[in-house]
Amino acid sequence: MEHYQIVNIQEVLEQKEGVAYQGEIGVFVPDNTHDFALAEGNPVYVNAFSYVLVLGGSAALSVDEQVYEISVNQICVLSPLHLTCFSRVSDDFKCLFLCLHKDFIDRISGFSLKQRITKGMNLHRHPVLSIAACDMEILAECIVNIQSQILRKGHLYHQELIQNALIKFYLELDNVLDRKTNHAEQTVVPNRKDMKLREFITLLMQHFKEEHQVTFYADALHITPQYLTLLVKRQTGKTVNAFIYELIYSEARNLLLATDLSIQEIAARLNFADQASFSKFFKRHSGKAPHGFREISSKA
């Protein structure tokens, strides 16, 4: 199996200044411009939908091996299938990160996850967008509000407060994205490969915990497993199987670090046949049994 790193929100929190709620939503406000790297500076996949608002300065952000020069009043919309890395950051660079796990949106009544993912996927090939200063100010205020609500840990309706703050952010973001979509952009029809990739990402984010086989995704997309593997490998450099397994492993680490679920409950949530199968899978990836991983991490 190819080895590469998918990090989750809880692991980002351990490395960067920020706040998070149950490893499912996090806001990060880096104050050290020389410490933007994750995984010792290597490109990583983040198991979250991420939004980077550039408030000042400039930086070079590598996304799927393409380098973007990002600067003030730009927003980066990143999916879990974007391989990212900061390669240069100016001394005055300032930004806000919002990272969001799909499970958090799943629990918002009447809120369409599929619509959120689809809007993000429309920017998959062009994830950096320039926006008006007034829109940047509004979006920044929304993220700061999410941060404030995450910090209100004693509130009886803590999760609901964060959810409402997130809905406001998405409504404002949709307003910006919809206004940015001009007539010329509307007439561009994505090719079949791009459409299938978007559909695959949507399916993967919705089903990776319960569906571990390539055939499920290929059948849902009405293509062969071989063609799906080729499509994803060309985009990400990784096979579909490797991506599914690494997402499961990332989710397992998150549940071990950020929740009090038992090993058996985590195994069931990730659709393993039993606790032994999950433990074997986890040890193959980490070199440690789930109990050992949790104990060592809690002492760190």
Image (tube, grey):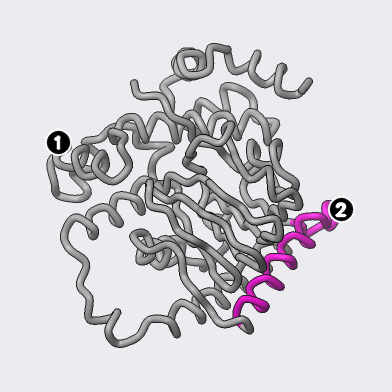
- Look at the magenta stretch and give its main secondary structure: helix
| Magenta span | 135-158
Where is residue 87 shown, x and y percent of the image? 53, 46
Q: Residue, x 66% and y 51% (percent of image)?
A: 26
Q: Position of residue 217 (x, y in %)?
A: 25, 43
Residue 277 position (above or below residue 205): above
Q: Position of residue 138 (x, y in %)?
A: 66, 78
Quadrant in which the C terminus is drawn: top right
Indicate the position of residue 45 as horizontal and vertical percent values.
47, 41
Q: Nearer the viewer, residue 63 or 17?
A: 63
Q: Is residue 104 above or below residue 131?
A: above
Residue type beneath disc 2: Gly
Q: Secondary structure at mark 1?
A: helix
Q: Residue at x 57, y 33 (%)?
A: 39
- Nearer to the camera, 236 or 10: 236
In this view of the protein, can residue 206 be seen by the observer? no
Judge whether residue 140 is colored magenta.
yes
Q: Which residue is mark 2?
A: 154
Quadrant in which the N terminus is drawn: top left
Residue drawn at x 51%, y 45% is 85
**Sooner in the amino-acid sequence: mark 2 or mark 1:** 2
Quadrant of residue 91 in the image?
A: bottom right
Asked if one can make out residue 157 in the rendered structure from this viewpoint, the answer is yes
| Disc 2 to disc 1, C-alpha distance | 50 Å
Q: Nearer the viewer, mark 2 or mark 1?
A: 1
Which residue matches tag 1?
226
